[in-house]
Amino acid sequence: MNATSLFWNRNLLLKHIAYWIAFVLFWGFVWGLSDYDFGRNILIQISCLPSRMLLVYISLYFLIPKYFMKKRYFEFFVTYMMLVLLISIVIQRPVMLFYVQPTYMPTWNTSNFFSSAEIINTALDINIAAVIPLAYQLLQTLETLRENNHELEVENGKIKENKEISTIDLKIDKSVHKVLVKDIIYIESQRNHVKIKLVNTELVVRHNISALQELLPGDTFIRVHRSYLVNSTKISSFSPAKIEVESETIPVGRLYKEQVKKILGYGV
């Protein structure tokens, strides 16, 4: 275990200890206001710590990872309620009935062990200790899930953006032609049509050059002119005014010069 892990574990342990000390002092003070016997009430709160700590830590380290983090919210709620009931009957009620009341409250009227009202009061009493830790942990879990979902969406977006496009489908007359992206040299807009210059041939299709640009990978195809879209892998030479592709000269439009300069890196 490295120094960072040791520091984190020690820091976490101190936070837990501080929470339970603050909890005992707070409720010892609140209940102590009824008779001003703060010491006795603090000891009662200490006596009730085992059941409260059991509820908190089973919930934090078992129920939340097993159910809540897997979005099984109904199962989490039902299991948590069953746990509260079980701890109330098996641990807290015996502690209260056979130790706390005889030791610290001898004049208290002892009720039936399985009294429904007493069991409910006991359940509410031990549940008080779990409210803040569970609320904090649940909020942290929800935030983690939200961040993970966001990171996944970003990653999926990157994958989608970087996904290699090998072909595009173009409708010519009544047929659909699959065109290899790597074979496209440049695309030229010609009024209501576009000419797609390929390695071994050329196609003329009724299409919009901007729409075709959306279909093609943006890191490969550069808009160098209002009427030209060029495959950067086919460029043999370039200058601020023109680009040579496969022995053909393509003009660089005035509005596109800065963008082309930035992408191709000339004049730097």
Image (tube, helix red, strand yellow):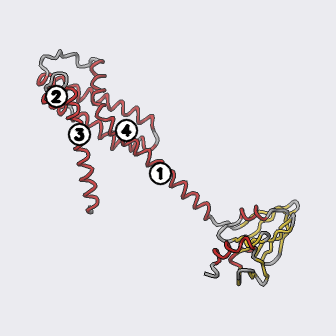
* Marks 3 & 1, CB-CB < 8 Å contact: no
Residue at x-position 78% and y-position 69%: 226
Identify the residue position indicated by label 4 in the image. Answer: 135
Measure how far apart labels 4 and 2 are at the Cα level: 26 Å
| Label 4 packing within 10 angstroms: few (<14), some (14-19), many (20+) | few
* Marks 1 & 4, CB-CB < 8 Å contact: no
Q: Earlier in the sequence, mark 2 or mark 3?
A: 3
x%, y% of residue 198? 79, 75
Name the kind of residue labelled 2 in the image.
Asn
Measure how far apart labels 2 and 3 are at the Cα level: 15 Å
In front: 181, or 243? Answer: 243
Name the kind of residue labelled 4 in the image.
Ala
Quadrant containing the N terminus in the rendered view: bottom left
Quadrant containing the C terminus in the rendered view: bottom right
Identify the residue position indicated by label 2 in the image. Answer: 41
x%, y% of residue 144? 43, 49
Circle 4 sits in a helix, a strand or a loop, which is it?
helix
x%, y% of residue 32? 18, 26
Q: Earlier in the sequence, mark 3 or mark 4?
A: 3
**Residue 152 vs residue 5: left or right?**
right
Identify the residue position indicated by label 3 in the image. Answer: 20
Q: Earlier in the sequence, mark 4 or mark 2?
A: 2
Measure how far apart labels 3 and 4 are at the Cα level: 16 Å
Measure how far apart labels 3 and 1 are at the Cα level: 30 Å
**Residue 166 vs residue 107: left or right?**
right
Q: Is residue 230 above or below residue 33?
A: below
